[in-house]
Image (cartoon, rainbow, N blue to C red):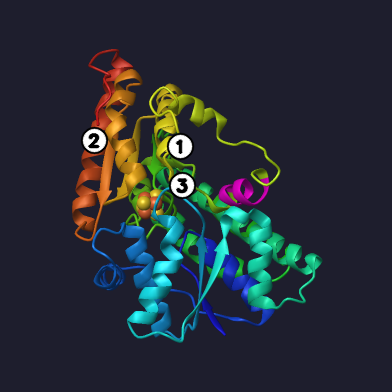
Amino acid sequence: MKVTAPRAGNLWVALRAALDQLGVEYVEPPRPTQRTLNLGARYSPEWMCVPFKIVLGNFIEAIELGADTVVMAEGINLCRLGYFAKLHEQILHDIGYPHVKMLRFSWQEKIIGLVKFLRGVLGEDLSWREIVGYIKYGLQQIIVMEDLEKRAHRLRPRAVNPEAVSRLWQQAGPRVSAAHTAPRLKAVAKAIHAELDRVELKPGFEPLRVAFLGEFMMVLEPSYNMDLEEELGKRGVEVVRHSWIAEWAKIWLFLELIGLGHGDDFKKAARPYLRRDVSGEAMQTLGETVLHAQEGFDGIIHIQPFTCMPEIMAQNIMPRVVSDHPIPVLPLLVDEQTGRAGLITRLEAFVDLMERRRVLKRRGTGSQRGVV
Ligand code: SF4
C-alpha cells in the first residue's frame, strides 16, 4: 500500500513520521503548482471551489508518483467539503485510476471516526493503546511544527535577513519528521529553536500587524496562498492567523466530543452581523475582524476561493463590520487565473496603505475609517 493525503500545512510531517514507523509507504504529494490546479480544474465541475480542484490535482500528481491509496476527510457540512471525498473518488476512477482506493476519515465522528479510520488502514486488531499512541505521536509532531511556524512568523519581519528565517523553517519539516521518538523530537525542536534564537534582529523595529483570515485550506497551506505570510514577513509585516491543525484537532476530536464549546469570543463578536453559522470559516472571519480591530491590528487579509459559499457571504457582510469597527481589509479572491505577480502588487499596495495609516494615527491626523 502506498498512501497519500492532501497537502495541508504541516500534516505531511506527521503523516510521514507515523507511516514510516508503521512501515507503510507514504507518497508525499508534490507542493501544488499551477500544473496541479490546471490538472484539478480539467477534471472538476467548473463551479467547484479552488480547494477541491487543487486537492484533486494533487491526488493525480501523487498517483503519478506511485500512490495507490488516498486518504481524505469527509463529513456532513453545509458547504461542499462534505462531498469532496466521494466526488474525488468517482472522478479518479473515471479518469483512468480505477485501482486507487479512497480511505475516508469522518471528522464529525470525532476521535471515534479517527480510530475507525486507523483500524481500516492498519488492521482491525490494533489495540486502543496503540491507536492512542499513534494519535499522540502525530499530534506531537504537528504541535512542534506549528510552534516553529508561529515563531517564524514573529521573527521574519523583525530579522535583518528574513531569508535566514525562511531557510531554517524550510529545513524544519524533514528534521522533525525524521525524529521517531519523543525524546528525539524534543531534542530536534530544541535545536531548531536555538538556531532561530541566533537570528539577528533589527533593533527597536515595530512591524505592522496583520490578521490572516478566511477559508481554512487557503490560510493553512502556503502553496494555496502563494506564500503570502512569507511575502508579508519579508516586507516587515507580522502575520497572525487562527487556522492551525493542532487547534482544529483539539476542537473536532476532543472538545466537541465532550460537549465543550469553542470560539465563544469570535462567535459573540460576529453575532450582530451573522446570526447563524453558515459553515466554513465565515463566522470566524467576521468575528476575528471585529476582535482584531479592537486590539489595534493594522489590517486584515481576507482570503477566499472563487465560488466558496461561506466566504462570499462573509465578504458581503464585511463592509458593515468595518464601518462599525474601522480597520483596512484586503479581500483576496483566488481562482485558476490568479497570478503571483498580481497578488504581490496588491500586498505591496496594502502594506503602503497600512504604513501611511499608522503614521497618520501617531500624528493624530487623517481618517481612520475602515476600508474594504
Ligand atoms: S469552505 Fe468554501 S472553499 Fe472550503 S470546501 Fe467549503 S465551499 Fe469549498
Amino acid type for the residue under numbered disc 2 = Asp
Disc with the residue nearer the chain's start (3 vs 2): 3
Disc with the residue nearer the chain's start (3 vs 1): 3
Q: Secondary structure at mark 3?
A: helix
Residue under label 1 = 277
- In the image, taking residue 71 as reference, residue 141 lies left or right, namely right
Q: Could you give the CA–CA distance between mark 3 and mark 2, rounded to whole angstroms?
A: 20 Å
- In the image, taking residue 161 as reference, residue 109 lies left or right, namely right
Provide the major secondary structure of the magenta segment.
Answer: helix
Q: What crowding class fits label 2: few (fewer than 14 Cα within 10 Å), some (14-19), or many (20 or more)?
A: few
Residue 72 locus on image (x, y percent): 50, 67
Disc with the residue nearer the chain's start (2 vs 1): 1
Amino acid type for the residue under numbered disc 3 = His
Residue under label 3 = 153
Residue 47's place in the image compared with 330, above or below, is below
97 is within the stretch colored magenta: no
State the residue at coordinates (74%, 66%): 131
Region in magenta: 247-254
Q: Looking at the image, which is closer to me, 39 or 184?
A: 39
- In the image, taking residue 189 as reference, residue 104 lies left or right, namely left
Q: Is mark 1 within 8 Å of ligand 1?
A: no
Q: Secondary structure at mark 2?
A: helix
Residue under label 2 = 352
Q: Secondary structure at mark 1?
A: loop
Q: Is residue 9 visible?
A: yes
Q: Looking at the image, which is closer to me, 229 or 270?
A: 270
